[in-house]
Image (cartoon, helix red, strand yellow):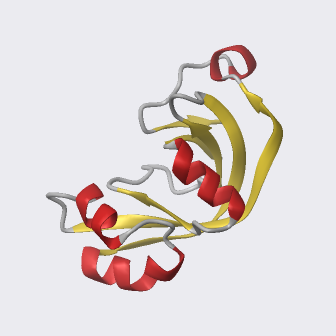
Amino acid sequence: MRVLLSIKPEFAEKIFTGEKKYEFRRTIFKRADVRGVMVYASAPISKVVGEFEIDTIISADLDILWAKTKSSSGITEKYFFSYFNNKDSGYAIKINRPVRYKSPLCVKGDLGMKPPQSYVYID
């Protein structure tokens, strides 16, 4: 099972350059069988630009999560804690084998679906 995950373009770029090895989420997928992620770079790109495998998903209190991931987070500590504002814990998806598509996909035209607000399951 895969998900189509909406990610800001600047962070999508960092995933494919290898600078960002974790994707952070305030909530995580309900299904336990999700193994891969298709990356939807949100506006202004608004295309599916690549994919990656999920290595592991870390769930932890924010201080612990930051300590475990900060060296490969691709974001600042300030941004991290701002993103998780009003949360006690969060999730870090460890990225494995990112692949950037040579030709980005259009969500509506190529996949026949609407762009996700956060994520959507793909069979």
45 shown above or below 4: above
Q: Which quadrant of the figure has residue 35? A: bottom right
The structure residue drawn at horizontal position 31% and vertical position 83%, both measured from the top left corner, is 64
121 shown above or below 74: above
The structure residue drawn at horizontal position 53% and vertical position 28%, both measured from the top left corner, is 44
The structure residue drawn at horizontal position 25% and vertical position 68%, both measured from the top left corner, is 89
Image side of residue 114 versus residue 35, left or right: left
Image side of residue 18 versus residue 8, left or right: right
Quarter of the image that includes the C terminus = top right
At which x and y percent is residue 40?
A: 59, 37
At which x and y percent is residue 60?
A: 32, 75
51 shown above or below 121: below
The structure residue drawn at horizontal position 36% and vertical position 77%, both measured from the top left corner, is 65
**Residue furthest right as drawn:** 102
Residue in front for this viewpoint, 28 or 106: 106
120 shown above or below 32: above
Q: Which quadrant of the figure has residue 108? A: top right
Residue in front for this viewpoint, 56 or 103: 103
At which x and y percent is residue 92?
A: 45, 67
**Residue furthest left as drawn:** 86
